[in-house]
Image (cartoon, rainbow, N blue to C red):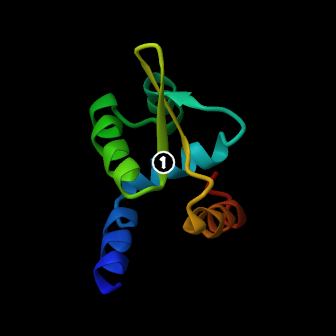
Amino acid sequence: MHERKEHILKVLGSYSRLKILATLIGCRERDLTLYMLTKYSKLSKDIVRRNVSVLIEAGFVDMKFYGTIRIFSINENNPIIDGLAEFLTKNKLV
């Protein structure tokens, strides 16, 4: 249990990962391609690509394929997402 908490804190302790999560939470009504996620988050493609993998592995982000295109969305089944979304919204970060 302690290791899981540490892992979550480590994942959320990155500006880039929080920016990606904020972007996906702000666009909950639609899925985003890597290009769109890069454009909306204003992060470089390399940074998004590297950090979105960590978020997928941690269960915060879902990825699916549309042909050869990767599509990203927030994992609505992760219980932490609702609290994070509420925090980001209340503080006008999305």
Would residue 16 be seen by someone viewing this image from the given angle? no
The residue under the point 39% across, 48% down is: 56
Q: Which amino acid type corresponds to the residue marked 1 in the rendered image?
A: Val
- Quadrant of the rendered structure where residue 13 is? bottom left
Q: How many numbered marks, from 0 up?
A: 1
Extreme residue toward the top, this view: 67
Compared across the picture, whether 24 is left or right of 4 comes to: right
Compared across the picture, whether 6 is left or right of 75 comes to: left
Q: Is residue 71 above or below residue 73?
A: above
- Quadrant of the rendered structure where residue 31 is? top right
**Residue 1, percent across and down?**
35, 84
Extreme residue toward the bottom, this view: 2
What element does badge 1 sit on? strand
The residue under the point 34% across, 52% down is: 57
- Quadrant of the rendered structure where residue 5 is? bottom left
**Residue 15, percent across and down?**
38, 57
Q: Is residue 30 above or below residue 60?
A: above
Frontmost residue, 90 versus 9:
9
**Residue 75, percent across and down?**
56, 51
Compared across the picture, whether 83 is left or right of 19 comes to: right
The residue under the point 48% across, 31% down is: 64
Q: Mark 1 highlights which residue?
A: 61
Frontmost residue, 69 versus 39:
69
Compared across the picture, whether 30 is left or right of 75 comes to: right
**Residue 53, percent across and down?**
32, 44
Q: Circle 1: is it few (<14), some (14-19), or many (20+) Cα within 10 Å?
A: many
Would residue 34 be seen by someone viewing this image from the given angle? yes
The residue under the point 37% across, 43% down is: 52
Q: Is residue 90 above or below residue 53?
A: below
